[in-house]
Image: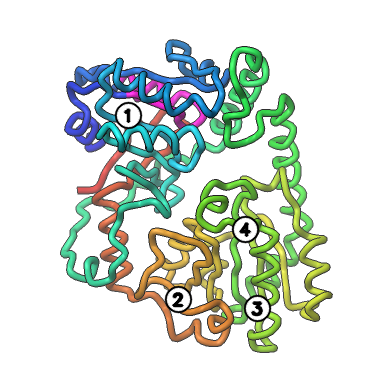
Amino acid sequence: MEFDKKIKKEFSGKNVTLLQGPIGTFFYRLAKKLRKYNVKVSKINFNGGDFFFYPTGTSYRDKEENLFLFYENFFKQHHIQAILMYNDCRLIHKKAIEVAKKLNIDVWIFEEGYLRPYCITFEKNGVNANSSLPRNKIFYLNQTLCVKRPVIKGIPGGFKYMAFYAFLYWFFSFLLALFFNNDLHHRTLYPFEFLFWLRSLYRKCLYKITEKKLNDKIYNLQKKYFLAVLQVYNDTQVKYHYKKSIEEFIEETMLSFANHARAKSYLVFKHHPMDRGYKNYSKFIQELSEKYHIEGRVFYVHDSYLPKLLKNALGCITINSTVGLSAILEGCPTKVCGKAFYDFEGLTYPKKLHFFWKEAHAYKPNPILVSNFKNYLLKTNQFNANFYKNSFLNYSKIFD
């Protein structure tokens, strides 16, 4: 398998430390795989959730200000040559990366797939806005890549597994809170976090009924609306590469739309499914619609079919979500308001947002550039897999 070849090539015979991984058993299974290639694996746990899924790791219980020195001593003591983590923007990972750069240690990051829903990302040095991928259309236009195998869509997304793992993670983080410093975590570790997941499930069922007519209406507005995709309210990509709130993104987008869009166009906000149990912006959007006199032209939906929304849209507005890349792959003109690895000439709209409403049609993504860019991702950092179901290390494919 290609993933096996990748880890064997990069880590065989080395000393490797795992930091926080995707919630669940993935890092525990990955460690078992690495040891087959004579890799000496260590693990650092930061809360009870980490400990539950990897009980043999070293526990860090100290304050944030002592984390840098802890990493420096740990990496030197264990002669670490590479560190692996999920997401490079978490506080504990940013500190680790600083130390790794100082000590000339390789940094590898896992992240949800750029090409979703059937891929995950495994990239060196940085992911998303921190990715070292070239941001130059000439580079990709000069590529002559051939992906021999198509994306295999048989591996399920694993949402129910992720939900169950999340419950266990938060439960044991709360249960073992006295033995760790939970303030280090990038999200709150409340004991009843699972209630938000239950509310998400309830709302999913509710919206399927209450938003059916609205979705049908939007689907019929072919090439008459712009789609603005919302992200998780505490997404680290928003925090570090946009530095504004989701509410600010909504209001800035609506104000720009009100002042510069054609009178017969519409604006659709699509809620992030992982935020369904935490946030609802209905009242906020309604109040802004009245404030900016665009009532009846702004819609807010939760569980619409995204590929259809993108296919029928005049354009897509995003902060830096990978939905922006999905829009580009659909040939939909796309405006990025934050920082994203795919935001460069030929793929995205280069000017300010207030010009986008009337010029989007002239800035469709270059189809040759899109194809080459996608193939390059498949060749370099995308795996046809998911983190949460026990299929990754058995069926993962990388495209060669």
Residue at 73% across / 78% down in the picture? 297
Badge 3 is on which residue?
Answer: 256
Q: Position of residue 392 (x, y in %)?
A: 37, 32
Q: Is residue 291 above or below residue 71?
A: below
Between 261 and 177, the one lying in front of the other is 177
Residue at 56% across / 23% down in the picture? 63
Which span of residues is magenta-colored? 17-32
Q: Position of residue 193 (x, y in %)?
A: 70, 31
User: What mark, if any, has residue 326 been given in the picture?
Assistant: none
Q: Give the image quarter of residue 64.
A: top right
Q: Position of residue 177 (x, y in %)?
A: 65, 17
Tell me which numbered mark, 1 or 2, is placed earlier along the sequence: 2
Residue type of the residue flagged with mark 4: Lys
Tell me which numbered mark, 1 or 3, is placed earlier along the sequence: 3
Badge 2 is on which residue?
Answer: 349
Q: Is residue 365 above or below residue 33?
A: below
Q: Residues within 10 Å of mark 4 (few under 14, many from 20)?
A: few
Q: Is residue 148 left or right of residue 50?
A: left
Q: Position of residue 73 (x, y in %)?
A: 36, 19
Residue type of the residue flagged with mark 3: Ser
Q: Element type at marker 3?
A: helix
State the separation of the CA atoms marked 3 and 2.
Answer: 15 Å
State the separation of the CA atoms marked 1 and 4.
Answer: 40 Å
Q: Residues within 10 Å of mark 3 (few under 14, many from 20)?
A: some
Residue type of the residue flagged with mark 2: Tyr
Tell me which numbered mark, 3 or 2, is placed earlier along the sequence: 3
Q: Give the image quarter of residue 364.
A: bottom left
Does residue 273 show up magenta in the picture?
Answer: no
Q: Residues within 10 Å of mark 2 (few under 14, many from 20)?
A: many
